[in-house]
Each structure stands twice: as C-alpha cells, then as structure tokens.
Amino acid sequence: MTKKFAAPRGTADILPEESEHWYTVEASAKSCLASHGYREIRTPIYEETALFKRSLGQTSDIINKQLLELKTDKEEGYALRPEGTASIVRCYLENSFDKKEPISKFYYAGPMFRGERPQKGRLRQFHQIGVEVIGTNCKSPYLDAEIIILAMRTLERVDVEGLSLRINSLGSHDDKAHISSWLREQLSKQNQEFCQECQDRLDRNVFRVLDCKKEGCQKLIKSIVKQLPLSKESEEYFQIVQKALRSSGVVFTIAPQLVRGLDYYIHTVFEITAQGLGSQDAVGAGGRYDGLVHELGGDPKVDYGAIGFALGVERILLSRSGQQDGIAGIYAFVIPMTADIQELAFKVTDQLRKGYLAADMSYGTGSMKSQLSRANKLNAKFVLILGEEEIKSNTITVKDMKTGAQERAPLNEIVGFMRLKQGSN
Ligand code: ATP
Ligand code: MG
C-alpha cells in the first residue's frame, strides 16, 4: 500500500475557511500596531543555535527541552526560532539601528517552533504577533506602560473576549541578585515539598521555580511569595507604570509570582489570559529585557533599553468567536450551459478578472441546480449564465443570488455592466 502522509505532530494545516479568520486577526493586529508607530520587521525563521542559547539562558525550558535544531554538516548549528526576540535584537545590532535612531519600534508576525508535547493550545509550530522596542534612549517606565496598553489594545481590536492582565516587577538588574537570594532562602524552607525539577532549579536558577507549571508547586509559591523585596527606586518605577496603566483605564492585578521564560527580564513583566481557553489560557506575555542587548554584542559604552511582548495567534483564534468576520466571496460566477460554450465563458471570466472584478467560472457540466449550489458555496453575488438563447441574442443572463432577480445584459459590455451594478450595490 502507498504511504499516507500526515502533517507532522504538533503542526496544523490552516484550511481556507480558517485562513479567512487568520487574515482578519493579522490585518487588524498589524493595523493597530502600525497606528501606534510600530514598523514591521521580518527575520529568518532559523538562526545560529548559539544565538538562542545566549539569549534564552541555559536553564530555560526552551533551551533544555524545546529547541528544534537543524541537521547540518557545518560546525556551527542552526535551530528553528522558538521566539522572536533574539532574532530581532541580532538584526537590530547587525543593522546598526543603535547608530541611526534613539529608539526603534518593531513588530513581527510569523511561525515559531518548539518541541513541546502537543495539546490544545500548545503546538510545535505556532504563530506569534509581537513587538520589540529597542533603543539607546528608552528606559522610561512610561514605555513599559505603553507596551502593556498596546498588547491589551491589540487583543481587544482582534475581538478576544474576557481578557485579564497580571503584572509584576522583578526589580532592576542590581535588585535581581538580592531577590534571587531572598527567594532561595524563602523557598528552601519548604524545599522537600517542591517537585524534583524545582528542587534542582532552586540552586541553578531560582526564578525558574516560579514558572513551574505543576499545580502543587504553584500553590506553594503563592503561599510563600507574597511580595518581592524591591529597592526603593524599583518600587517607584513600578508605581509609575501602574499609575500610567490606570490613567489609560487598563485593569490589572499584581502577581508577585509572575516571571518570564527569559533570564534577562528586569522591572516590568506581564501576562495576559483570556477566558474559555482551559489550562493553556495565556494569550500573550512580555516584559523589559535591557541586559540582553549587551549579551548579544551591543556596544558596551551604550546603556540600551529593550522591551516587548508576544501574542499567540492560535490561542487568539480559539478565544474569539470569529462570527463577525465578513467571509470574502466572489462577485460573479459564470456558468456555460453546455460544454461548447466553455470557450466563451472562459473569455467572459477572463475579461471580468482583467477588470478587477472577483470572478470564477464553472468547468463542470452538471445540472443547473448543482452549478447554482456551487455558486452559493463560493458566496457569489451574481451568476452569469450563458446558454444558446443568450448566444443567439448576444446577451448574458445576470442573476442576483440574493433576490433571485434575473436580467439580460449585452454580452460585449458585460464588464461595464457588472461594474455599474457594483457601484449601485
Ligand atoms: P506557556 O506558559 O503557555 O508555555 P510561554 O511562556 O512559553 O507560554 P511565551 O514564550 O511568552 O509563552 O510566548 C507568548 C505566547 O505565545 C503565549 O502566551 C502563548 O499564547 C503563545 N505560545 C507559546 N508557546 C506556544 C505553543 N507551544 N503553542 C501555541 N502557542 C504558544
Ligand atoms: Mg512554554
């Protein structure tokens, strides 16, 4: 028997009826981001493995378990990108944006790859829409607020319902060392009650413990970590972010346990969830990661700032009804009544298309009923019928699919005729 092929595990085909919704989400999100002063950037979907290792940190789950590496003969390895930030910082530095402008605001959209255990809302190839702001002059807490507001607004504009926002501050770079030893001290008191993985993480990278997905560990963490010990400056920074969010009408809760996957996050981190998604309910997340720019080769004399977020498109699509999307149909569907009229039908269709009208034709020879049902499936506004009668009188029958009204139009002026109809509709 011939082998039957299937899409790789954890990937999904996006079929035409779904891609209409994808298009709506991507187009609305991009227009929202562009209207806030962000410009699209497109980087390759694979990079040197070392770039991801450097940016995500050796102790992160993505590096330890999820990186999909490409097989090559070369010494330096490549891997499919698990997220967008590393590539964009690499691109920012490679193209010397830091020499050209004080602040760069990018957005991106595209597939990401992680070797995860596939389940609802968790794929190996999934898609993100995200933004990164990087600059030599962008350390303002108001930018943290802008980014959070922008993430929420983008999700609202693509009709995600039941959003909730959690924010936290991990403090400045200097605070983090202090917070790290404080956390280790607190969590060690109940060391035995954490899962084995968390017990290892306690020594290696205590922030990763807070990110554990296991319910038992999450409960423990919530009971132990009520507030992170921030310095006065960091606390003030965080207060400005909160005040700015309130002034924009953004509702949030403070989650002292919230951390992000990357090691370089400082100050503000956040996560947005949507209702009805079950256990994989995070539709987006982000935060400030100033230190990463130096880590990837930024000028040591420059004090970079960097902040961004990523939204998961599959989860966005799961959490919106999508019924409000107008499904694009064709304008005219041309039906030749007999096979020998196909040549003429082909010419008519071609003329309509040349005239920028969305048109298609029937290549089959089924009954009129089956041809009309095909037109209905294609959401056609009009059906143009060519039979012997029409040819004799040099006309074409135009049927309005909604009202059922029929009229005859002059065959050699059909494009103009259909254009006028479009104008009056
Ligand atoms: P999670 O906690 O769900 O594993 P994460 O911390 O790995 O998420 P990020 O790296 O912050 O997620 O990515 C941002 C968003 O991308 C997530 O909020 C989610 O919507 C989406 N996302 C992440 N991983 C996947 C995946 N494997 N499949 C589908 N969407 C994903
Ligand atoms: Mg994950």
Image (spheres, rainbow, N blue to C red):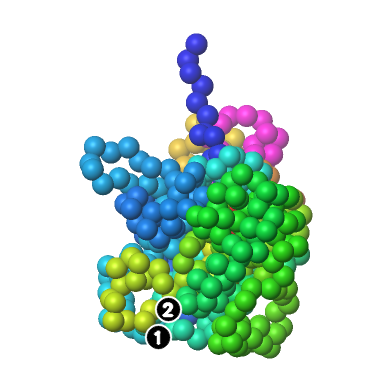
Q: Is residue 385 magenta?
A: no
Is there CB contact under 8 Å for labels 1 and 2?
yes
Instruction: Say what amino acid the circle numbered 1 marks.
Output: Asn
Residue placed at 39% from the left, 54% from the top?
53
Task: Tell me if the residue at label 1 has its CB under 8 Å from ligand 1.
Answer: no
Query: Which quadrant of the frame does ligand 1 lie within?
Result: bottom right
Q: Secondary structure at mark 2?
A: strand
Q: Is residue 280 left or right of residue 7?
A: right
Residue 140 locus on image (x, y percent): 50, 86
Q: Which mark is residue 137?
A: 1
How many numbered marks does the figure carry? 2
* Image position of 194 with respect to 418: above or below: above
Residue labelled with disc 2: 305
The magenta-colored residue range is 360-374
Per the image, is 364 magenta? yes
Q: Which amino acid is tagged 2?
A: Gly
